[in-house]
Amino acid sequence: MISGEAIREFYYNSDIKYYVFGTNGISVRADKNGFFDFDLKKVSFCTSASAFDVIYYYNSGAQKRLSRVNIPVRYELSLPQTSSRTTASFNGATVKALSNDGGRLVFETENVGAFSVVEFEFDDVREPFRWFYNHVNSAGALGILDGMDGRNFEPRANVTRAQLAAMIVKATQDIISYRIDPSLSFKDVPQGKWYYDYVMKCAALGIVDGVGDGMYNPLAGATREEIATVIARLLKLIGKYGENPLPDIDASSAGAELAGLYIDSGSIHNYARESVLLCYKLGIMQGDSEGFRARSKTVRAECAKIFYLINRELSIIK
């Protein structure tokens, strides 16, 4: 319990940046400005392993239970076990973890009140024996990709060029300063579409480009060589993969190297050969018994794995 006078004193003290509340294995760091209100008599705070409750008591006798704040609150919980799929849930709203290392879960949210800690799963990706189970659900927990229909992921559906741009931005937005260049435009990517920002942010940095005649073709399925190409552009922009510099790729010998790796290397377009070889050497895309399948459409489960791996490796250099 903190008095209204103390709240005002803290508010006007420039040396105090935020409050920290803690008990029983949970600590909550909150911006002080989010808890200041005029005519306060006192403010009660209650922290537990599953809630952070705040109640305002006013001099008028009125009460208000806080449910949201304008600046995100940081929660830190000690847990016996966490994974890449561990998230917090406020009334069904998933909040991804900023960190889940060493049995400690850290997340930020505007929500205040009761929450639960859950292992994230899409409704149609609940069978752990599927090769994509952990990659899809971990990527969902990290906010790298979204479901197609509420809580369904549709792992076998083709990835569209619009979805690809969204995955790129969400997987790397913490380390790349994305922007929109107002001088760029695509006839088929109008403002107001859900994918406008994602496509135009990638286009501004040269990660994606159009298909000719001023078009981007956002709803077309992305081929494997297209995905390898945008990944190579992305990584060259960053200059690293994990803690290591990017491997050198000799353009003059890339075709010969690919011929030794894939039985269908001849189907890889010239423009994509260096990118495909880079992705192979980094372990991001490696093909199967049929070869690289350069011109095959890529399903959402495959992209989940790709961007989960990229996010995991790039997080090292944040």
Image (cartoon, rainbow, N blue to C red):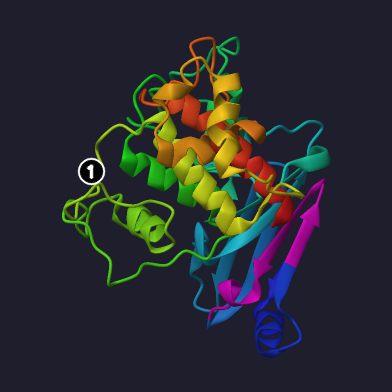
Extent of the magenta region? 20-37
Please state the horizontal and vertical placement of residue 73, each as a whole percent of the image: 62, 61
Is residue 162 something that shows in the picture? yes
Image quarter in which the N terminus is found: bottom right
Q: Residue at x 24, y 38 (%)?
A: 219
**Quadrant position of residue 269:** top left
Name the foreground residue: 46 vs 69: 69
Left or right: residue 303 versus residue 279 is left
Quadrant of image for the C terminus: bottom right
Left or right: 297, with 175 as reference point: left
At label 1, which amino acid type do we have? Answer: Asn
Q: Nearer the viewer, residue 307 or 213?
A: 213
Residue 8: quadrant of the picture: bottom right
Specify the quadrant of the image occupied by residue 287: top right
Residue for point 68% across, 60% down = 45
Can you say whether 294 is above or below 247 in the image?
above
Q: Is residue 208 above or below residue 45?
A: above
Q: Residues within 10 Å of mark 1 (few under 14, many from 20)?
A: some
The residue where tag 1 is placed is 217
